[in-house]
Image: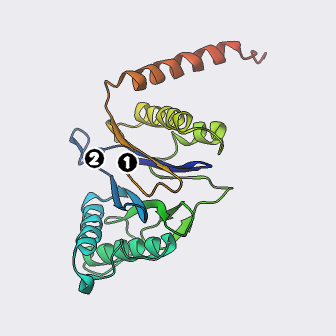
Amino acid sequence: MTYCVGMRLDQGLVFMSDTRTSAGVDNFAVSKKMFSWQVPGERAITIMTAGNLATTQSMINLLEERSVSGEDRDPSILRQPTMFQVARLVGATLREVISGSSPTGQTSDDQFGASVIVGGQINGGKPTIFMIYPAGNFIEITDDTPFFQIGETKYGKPILVRAYDRKMEFADAIKLLLVSFDSTVKSNLSVGLPFDMQIYENGSFTTDRTKRINADDPIYQTIATGWGDALRDAFQRLPNYEV
């Protein structure tokens, strides 16, 4: 399982993903789930993946291969004119891989299924984020839906819904995401550290602001401990329900 979040703020985009993969109850490994492409001054694109690892790795490898090959290897993620077209290409590539993995073609069976978050900005367009489903169809982020989650979403969503503010600074957004991820890690063994984080500032056209957050990161440890203490304190201050 996986947990990934793509969030839109007034000043840009924030991405965070875990890195745990599992092949059984006691067989865990670390695998990168966040991938980026950039053409400085022209475009910055980030993809996060959840689902069947063979499917997602094949999709990323295809996108990467087609981005570095000659013109005859189009379509390339680096030559799409808009983020909408990037989302269409990623969706088509995901569908291509899933269909090719099943001996009977793509079905409703999720054995080879995967979902994707793709976001970024291309010069001349706005920064945006899309969530792509296994069938290749997708939806775009809106003011009513300012963040997307894929993977193990239920444990980390409540804090995002309660505390998200589009005007918040990047530092506050990262803190919010770390609380969301910490809640998920404590609730599901198939989600785990380290976390990969990326900040995209509007109009920067670069994916260089990235960081890997490990379990011994002092700020993460302080946030995780402080959030637990704050919850206990808030619980004690709530009125009792007399019965």
Residue at image position (26%, 46%) is 22
Residue sitting nearer the eye, 169 or 242: 169
Residue at image position (57%, 64%) is 126
Q: With 26 as the anchor, is 199 left or right in this view?
A: right
Q: Give the residue type at disc 2.
A: Thr
Q: Give the residue pinned by disc 2.
A: 21
Any part of residue 135 in sight: no
Residue 185 on image: x %, y %: 40, 34
Number of the label disc, if any, that sits on residue 2: 1
Q: Give the residue type at disc 1.
A: Thr
How many residues crowd around disc 2 within 10 Å: few (fewer than 14), some, or many (20 or more)? many
Residue at image position (49%, 62%) is 121
For label 1, the SS is loop
- Residue 185 against residue 11 in the figure, above or below: above
Q: With 67 as the anchor, is 236 left or right in this view?
A: right
Count of all numbered marks drawn on residues in the image: 2
Residue 50 on image: x %, y %: 37, 55
Any part of residue 160 in sight: yes
Q: With 182 as the anchor, is 98 left or right in this view?
A: left
Residue sitting nearer the eye, 38 or 6: 38
